Image (tube, rainbow, N blue to C red):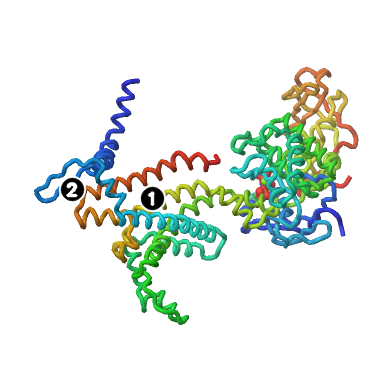
Amino acid sequence: MRRTTIYAWLMLLPAMVLLMAFTHYPAIRTIIASLHSTARGHRASVFVGLANYERLLSDDVFKQVLWNNLIYGALTVPVSIAIAISMALLVNYKLRGRGFVRMAYFTPTVLPLIAVANIWLFFYTPGFGLIDQIRGMFGLAQQNWIGQPDTVLYAMMVVTVWKEAGFFMIFYLAALQSISPSLYEAAAIEGASRWTVFRRITFPLLMPTTLFVSVNAAINSFRLIDHIFVMTGGGPNNASSLLLYYIYQVAFREWDTAYGATLTVVLLAILLLLAVGQFFFFDRKVHYK
Amino acid sequence: MMDGVVLQSTSKMFGSTWAVHDISLHIPDGSLTVLLGPSGCGKSTLLRLIAGLETPTAGTISINGRRVDQQPVGKRDLSMVFQSYALFPHLSVADNILFGLQVRKVAKAEQALRLSRVASMMGLENLLERKPSQLSGGQQQRVAVARAVISQRRICLMDEPLSNLDAKLRAEMRQDIRNLQQTLGLTMVYVTHDQIEAVTMADQIVLLNEGRIDQIGAPDAIYSRPATIFAAKFIGTPPMNLVTSATLNAHGETNFPEGSVVGIRPEDLVLDADGPITGHVVMVEYLGADRLVTCKIGVESLIVRTPARSDLPDEGRIRLAYLPDSVHLFDAKSGQRLTQ
Ligand SMILES: Nc1ncnc2c1ncn2[C@@H]1O[C@H](COP(=O)(O)OP(=O)(O)OP(=O)(O)O)[C@@H](O)[C@H]1O
Ligand SMILES: [Mg+2]
């Protein structure tokens, strides 16, 4: 008994060491750093308690990026899920050339986000970008989509949705293919319309996938910011800045490492909340097996 | 115009093989027709053609005089029990049963009334809140039957609805379904590979073999006059004895036509010291009231059903007699019944 316990711990050791060294230890260091001041020149770092967190509360940029991030998540998550489900239903349908369509939908996922950002940079270019050229055909005026504060965040969301929907589609496709065709036949015998079948059968049976995808999408909305770097640098006037991008600016542009650590703790707390939420809340409600 | 379901030269091809071939059939209104046959003979395919889940490669299907073979599934106004049950895994038993009524927006009170009736009939009262995954195979099957029955549609298709029940429950459900069909006057098409089920329930049996109709008829008609060797073998337990005329003529004072196969049911044979056929006993199987005696006749054998009380001659040579008019003659090559 004791020997097997020791054996078990030994087996776990390599993974635990790695996890602690590269995940737990840095996280704890970050929390400690957030309770100290940033060392500057001859002034050493000192313990300041919650002073950095007080600064958060009066930091308008922080409030703005947090708000940006919430809108960004609240829109990109459901929209990419809706598009992913629609694409999966379409591809799953006995459609001619569906292998090709499937590939086409999946392509954005394979591309690195940096490359995607460059493509979209071209789409959005005022005057001769793809979008303005199409608008031009209808006699519409030029628009600088990523140069104006009230459109830039939405322009970034479009890029995200474009990038992610294809990836999520793959999960939905797998889930759809595991639904027994006889369920649809049984519903058809009862005379259920397509919409009823979707609402009462397909969508509920996709729920576990939707949960998985939405948590991933929510986490990604805090995590994936490559396109912000390439396309806007958070501008104009922080209108497209997200939490992680702001952390990068504070910590590595302004070298205010203590405040950067404080923002990071906030980000960690949000991600933790999402994970815990999934674990305790959804997991129970969603499963029907 | 004919009431009920009519199939005319209906065929279905999958790839390059005929799953169902040239079936012409009348299923009378208010009757119970059993599609019977071995695994893979096309029973489910035929049922799915009637349901509209498959479209025929050739031929027509009409219901109450109206062509339906190009109509979508939902328009045919029939209910169906699937071989795989096809229960919705995320819905409770009650919602599974009520699905069709909900889809058709039947009034709530009416739904509740019908649900309680059907649930008590199927013995599902205590399971209504469960999910299908929390039920045994037999319980799931009963939910599937309940879902079909509650729709009160005139035509009901059932694909092996009792295959997963134990013997006792199966016998009970058999009667329940038959009673239901008769009291509601349903037109029922019932698929099974179990000939006992077929014989006990059917008004009409359609015996299928490799996608074709072998014989259609009432159970007693098929039992007493099987049209082919296949039908003779398929219906009856133990099956009809089938031996070549050559063997019988060589080991008895009989004179059956050459090139024929002689069929005699075990209950039509008697041990009789003066009988025309000679053989010897090789095995005795005790069944309670009866006893099955296997007798070797040359290289072939005959099974005789005798009352268990009667004495058996000591192991060794015996003679057998058969009741007059109980002999079925088939052509050895074509397997078809020879006229008599
Ligand atoms: N969708 C399909 N595609 C190709 N072949 C099929 C398909 N469905 C059935 N078949 C073939 O058609 C034949 C008849 O199948 P069917 O399911 O009707 O048999 P069955 O009599 O119901 O058998 P069982 O008693 O095993 O259910 C089989 O040879 C089967 O392999
Ligand atoms: Mg079948």
**Circle 1: element type:** helix
- Residue A14 placement (x, y as % from top left): 27, 36
B106 or A243: nearer the viewer = A243
Q: Is residue A153 left or right of residue B241?
A: left
SS for callout 2: loop
Among all residues in the image, which is located at the extreme left? A42
Q: Which of B186 and B111 is in front in this view?
A: B111
Of all chains, the one bearing label 2 is A
Q: What residue type is labelled 1?
A: Ile
Q: In the image, is B203 to the left or to the right of B143?
A: right
Q: Is residue B188 visible?
A: yes
Horizontal and vertical percent for residue B158?
Answer: 73, 45
Mark 1 lies on residue: A219
Taking the image as drawn, is residue A224 in sight? no
Q: Label 1 crowding class (10 Å Cα cut-off): few <14, some 14-19, many 20+?
A: some
Of labels 2 and 1, earlier in sequence is 2
User: Neighbour class for label 2 at 10 Å: few (<14), some, many (≥20)?
Assistant: many
Q: Residue at coordinates 89% horizontally, 32% vertically from top-left? A: B323
Quarter containing the C terminus of chain A: top right
Quadrant assignment, res B126: top right
Q: Quadrant of the N terminus of chain A?
A: top left
Disc 2 marks a residue whose amino acid type is: Thr
Write down the chain letter for disc 1.
A
The residue tagged 2 is: A38
Locate residue A52, reporting x and y percent. 25, 46
Count the marks.
2
Q: Share a chain, discs 2 and 1?
A: yes
Q: Quadrant of residue B282?
A: top right
Q: Residue B258: give x, y in percent of width and height.
A: 81, 44
Which of the two marks, 2 or 1, is nearer to us in this view? 2
